[in-house]
Amino acid sequence: MSQLEAIEGQLRAEGLRFALVASRFNDFIVDRLINGAEDYLVRHGADRSQLELIRVPGSFEMPVVVKKLMDKGGYDGIICLGAIIRGATPHFDYVAAEVSKGLANVSIQYGVPVGYGILTTDSLEQAIERAGSKAGNKGAEAAHAVLETVRVLAQI
């Protein structure tokens, strides 16, 4: 075990403001991710009045919306929630790759954590498993990652 003191994020959401950017596409899955992220943040002290939900057509539109939110300012973290499910064409690969790159670039450019709660699955069954059944809720996990990162950044 290391003797080094670690900077670690405390999981307290009091006083923080978050945007949840959620896709309308596959909304029956995404709504479960929204519920998971909201529940996680509120259970860790967030005030619901400090959570803002922004709906976008699909995951591909998220990077430009997140950039606009960053330009506007006032958010401690942004949590992106969507579901990209593989089909019979290469569309899945293009969308998933570009969304990932776009969100990472915006987060790095602005220094504000962006949570990746976007499911990229091979089937609807896998998406359901990751939206609150067997494999947990990836919306809650994205909220956790953003909250912890916000608190780490505040200490650096």
Image (cartoon, rainbow, N blue to C red):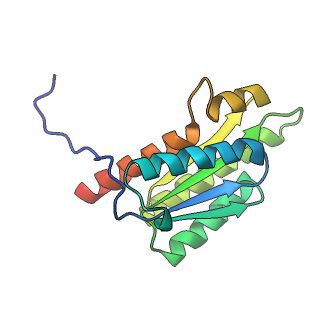
- On the image, the x and y values in percent for residue 128 come to 71, 31
Residue shown at the point (64%, 66%) measured from the top left: 65
- On the image, the x and y values in percent for residue 49 come to 49, 67
Instruction: State which quarter of the image contains the N terminus.
Output: top left
Vertical relation: 20 (above or below) 68? above
Instruction: Pick the residue in front: 27 or 70.
Output: 27
Vertical relation: 123 (above or below) 98? above
Looking at the image, can residue 17 be seen? yes
Instruction: State which quarter of the image contains the C terminus.
Output: bottom left
Q: Residue furthest bottom?
A: 72
Position of 49 with respect to 137 (left or right) is left
Residue shown at the point (88%, 36%) measured from the top left: 89
- On the image, the x and y values in percent for residue 136 come to 56, 30
Looking at the image, can residue 156 be seen? no
Instruction: Pick the residue in front: 105 or 147.
Output: 147
Instruction: Pick the residue in front: 14 or 81.
Output: 14
- On the image, the x and y values in percent for residue 12 come to 32, 51
Vertical relation: 106 (above or below) 94? below
Residue shown at the point (78%, 59%) measured from the top left: 57
Vertical relation: 155 (above or below) 67? above
Position of 105 with respect to 4 (left or right) is right
